[in-house]
Image (cartoon, rainbow, N blue to C red):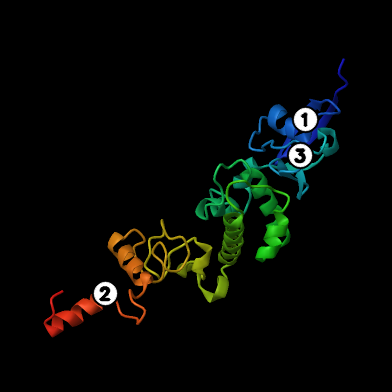
Amino acid sequence: MTDEREITLTVNGTEHTIEVEPRRLLVHAIREDLDMTGTHIGCDTGNCGACTVLKDGEPIKSCLMFAAQADGAEILTVEGMEDLPEADDLHPLQEGFREEHGLQCGYCTPGMLMAGKALLDEHPDPDEETIRDAISGNLCRCTGYQNIVRSIEYAADELENRTAADGGAVAVDGASESEGPASPEGGHAAPEFGGDADTFCGREDCCGGPDGADPFDRDALLDDAADADGPDNADGTSDADADTDATDRGDTV
C-alpha cells in the first residue's frame, strides 16, 4: 500500500489540497493532479528549465522538487500570469514574446516566462547582461535567445509605462501617456513615425519606421539593392554612366 500524505498548495491564487506519494515530483502534481499542463516537462533532470515555476516568488525547477517539499507554498505557473495585477488581457511578458517573436516551437516558453517574471520582480529595469544571466538556466533550441532578450526588454518598458500611466505621471523619457511610449525600440507602438501600429516592429527603417517606407514595397527594395551594389567600375562610375557619355559623343552603344 502506497504511503500518501496530504499537502496544500496555493497555485495561481487558488488553494488546493491533494494526496501525494512522498516521491511525487512537484511538476507531476501540477500537471496531473491539478491539470495545469502549461508547465512543461523537458529533461526531467533540471537542465532545460522548461518546468520552471515560481515558488513563493522564487524560480524553481519543479522536476527537482518533491510535491511534499512545497507543502504550504504559493506557486505561480504560466496559467496564472494573465490574472496578475500588471496584466491587461495578457501579461507584458506574454505580450513581449508575441510582439518580439520570442518563441518558435514554444516548448521552452512557459519556463522562460517564469524566469523573466522572477527577474522583473527583482530588477524592473535590467540590462541585457542581467537578462541573459537570469535565463541562463533555461534552454531554447529555436530562437538563438536574442528575441527572448528583446521580449523581456519589451516587458520591462511596458511595465514601466503602465506604472507611470497608473500614477498619472509622465512616462519614460518625458513622453506623456497620450503620446504613447517614449521609445519606439520597445516595439509596442508606432507613434510619430507614421507607421502602422499593428505591423510596426520597433526598429528604425523597418516595418513603417522613421523613414515611413513600406517594408514590402518591391520596387523600393530593388532600388535599395541596386544602390547597395555600388559602382560597376573601379573608377567609381557605373556602366550606365559610360553609356550616357558614349551617347553624348555620338558613339554607337
* Residue type indicated by callout 1: Thr
Please name the residue shown 84% across and 28% down the image. 23
In the rendering, which numbered label is found on residue 62? 3
Query: Which numbered mark, 2 or 3, is in the foreground of this view?
Result: 2
Does residue 177 appear to the left or right of 218 in the view shown? Answer: right
Residue at the limit of the structure toward the front, as seen here? 252
Query: Which numbered mark, 3 or 1, is in the foreground of this view?
Result: 3
Calculate the distance from the C-alpha at mark 1 to the C-alpha at mark 2.
80 Å
Query: Which residue is the site of mark 2?
Result: 239
Instruction: Describe the element under mark 1 as helix, strand or loop.
Output: strand
* Residue type indicated by callout 3: Ser
Residue 227 versus residue 19 in the image, above or below: below
Residue 221 versus residue 240 in the image, above or below: above
Q: Is 10 in front, or is 68?
A: 68
* Residue type indicated by callout 2: Asp
> Pointer 3: residues within 10 angstroms few (<14), some, or many (20+)?
many
